[in-house]
Amino acid sequence: MVQSGFEVVQSWLEVVQSGLELVQSKLEAAQFRLEVAQSRLEAAQSLYEVAQFCLGVAQSLYEAAQFCLGAPQFHIEAAQSRIRVAQFHIEAAQSRLRVAQFQVEAVQSHHEVMQSYLRECDPTQS
């Protein structure tokens, strides 16, 4: 009877160990997704900075075209077109930045839940 009880406890401990290993692998996967999301966030921030720079250049070109009294109208229109394109790129970069920030927050939340679950399931931390 004692032997049977020992076997039940041993089986239960193996199940708990398997569960902990599964949670650990999920935590590692969540950590990887967090790193990917952070990388995407950094890329989106870089694109946003490039788009802002392009907007500044386009605005400078527009102002220079307006300053030149003898400049043909098409220079002004081209500069306005470049400003619209740069603004579109900024909006797109901002959108990618928001998506990347959301992904980072989601992965961080998942990571915290997995860590909490691991702490609750780990019999050595009681």
Image (cartoon, rainbow, N blue to C red):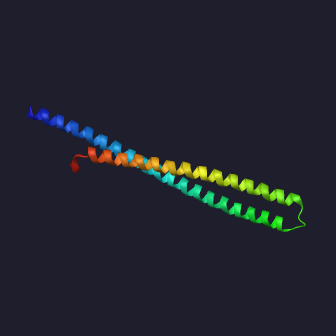
**What is the x, y in percent for residue 47?**
63, 57
Left/right placement of residue 27 relative to residue 101 reads left
Image height of 33 relative to 14, above or below: below
- Please state, as top left, top right, bottom left or bottom right, where the N terminus lies in the image: top left
Q: What residue is rendered at 46% in x and 50% in y?
A: 105
**What is the x, y in percent for residue 120?**
27, 45
Left/right placement of residue 50 relative to residue 68 reads left
Q: What residue is rendered at 58% in x and 58% in y?
A: 45
**What is the x, y in percent for residue 3?**
11, 34
Say how many tags the image has: 0
Left/right placement of residue 62 relative to residue 50 reads right
- The part of the image, by quadrant, that contains residue 5 is top left
Q: Nearer the viewer, residue 57 or 50?
A: 57
- The part of the image, by quadrant, that contains residue 60 is bottom right
Q: Which of 84 and 3 is in front in this view?
A: 84
Q: What residue is rendered at 13% in x and 32% in y?
A: 4
Q: Which of 9 and 53 is in front in this view?
A: 53
- The part of the image, by quadrant, that contains residue 15 is top left
* Residue farthest left in this picture: 1
